[in-house]
Amino acid sequence: MEKFADIIEQIKKQKTIGPPEFFTDQVMRQLPDQYPGILPAAASFINQLYNHILAPDGDRDSGLTRRECSFYFFITGFFYLIIGTILMIGFQGISSSIAAMEWIKLQPHLTIGAAIWLLVLGMVLISSDRAGIKAVRYGTLFYVFFAFVNGILVWQYLNVPFAGVLIIGFVATSAIMGVMLAKAVKKVELRAI
Amino acid sequence: MALDQKIEAEIVARILKGDRQSYALLVEEYKTPIYNLAYRMTGNAEDANDLTQETFVRAYKYLWRYDQRKKFFAWIYTLAFNLIKNHFKKNKKEKFSDKLSTSSLVDNHPSPEEKLIEEQEIGSYLLRLEDELRALLIMKYQQELSFEEIAGITGKSLSAVKMRIYRGLDKLKELMNE
């Protein structure tokens, strides 16, 4: 900023222009005669309550708070945890028929692995410094990369009609979730500068 | 430039309970920085007055939305900034910066506003900047807001604000060297 020192100085020297005389009276004349007492007070109370629940630290001027962002990681992680558990139970009944499909047999474990990965990232996010936030973003991008690799490998094993469409659907969903999470982390990162 | 946050919260609570006159305290406290922003942005006293009045009337109407843990100034300043932005969108063809480039060439009887600009050369260069860059430079260097406050007001990230302010200064220097 050194090279702009003279310009900055000139901007600072500009006179502060104030409003005309009686400005306050003009404004007061335009206000409604009576503020309906109870209704706005109640609305304000609900609004304050909402703000407190959403951001107890009051820290939401721009971007996302860590708390909000880690919440996204937790709900995504729990989503995978539920899917993983359902897959785990379901695969017990049909495992004999897919004995040869080693990679497919691993899917319930991989889903639970993804859940744990995202939950851990959420925890790191809430408790770490700037370097930690960056690590969480790379961790999220690794999750997206892994979703693609997993999709390709599953495709190799499945010889079912329309398997490609299903796999593309699953991979795209995972990738979109991952990219959204990475974008959310980026917002947290920008705030921390 | 600002009242104590606790006092502000008390004033707001009183207004919300129906004490209309308490609002005059807030208007009195913040009218100058808001008017100054409007004036520096539009370069026109009449528009600045209208926009500042509209800001305060609107703030009164929507006071229940104000988050009392934050500074009232930041909230009302954001409101003013958005009104000014909308004003420019609506009146794009009548921007003062556009008028300046033509009227000053043909008018031998400059208006008081134009006289002021002649006196304050930097002001005329500022008016030739993009609206957004001009607003950022005014907030940062004339009204001495912090980068964080500006990010909160404009809804941009801190790094974006820093980058745009740098770009604004660079552009301003370029204009002055032309």
Image (tube, grey):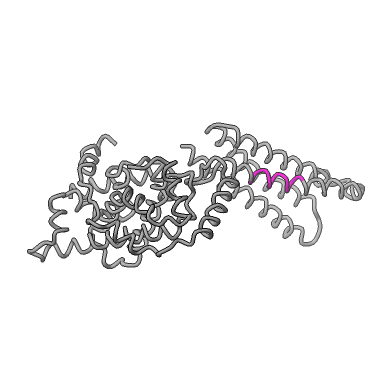
Quadrant in the rendering for residue B60: bottom left
Pinpoint residue B172: horizontal percent, then vertical percent: 24, 48
* Type of secondary structure dominating the magenta stretch: helix
Residue occupying the far left of the picture: B108
Check residue A77 for magenta coloring: yes
User: Looking at the image, which residue is at 62% across and 38% down?
Assistant: A139
User: Looking at the image, which residue is at 47% across and 50% down?
Assistant: B13
Looking at the rendering, in which quadrant would you find the N terminus of chain A? top left
Q: Against B50, is A9 above or below?
A: above
Nearest to the observer: residue B28 or residue A132:
B28
Pinpoint residue B42: horizontal percent, then vertical percent: 26, 58
Check residue B144 for magenta coloring: no
Quadrant in the rendering for residue B84: bottom left
User: Looking at the image, which residue is at 22% across and 39% down?
Assistant: A9
User: Looking at the image, which residue is at 45% across and 55% down?
Assistant: B63
Nearest to the observer: residue B97 or residue A24:
A24
The segment highlighted magenta reads A72-81
Residue B54 appears in view = yes
**B145 relative to A134 in the view: left or right:** left
Nearest to the observer: residue B176 or residue B151:
B151
Q: How many marks?
A: 0
Residue B128 appears in view = no
Pinpoint residue A133: horizontal percent, then vertical percent: 56, 36
Pinpoint residue B103: horizontal percent, then vertical percent: 15, 65
Quadrant in the rendering for residue A173: bottom right
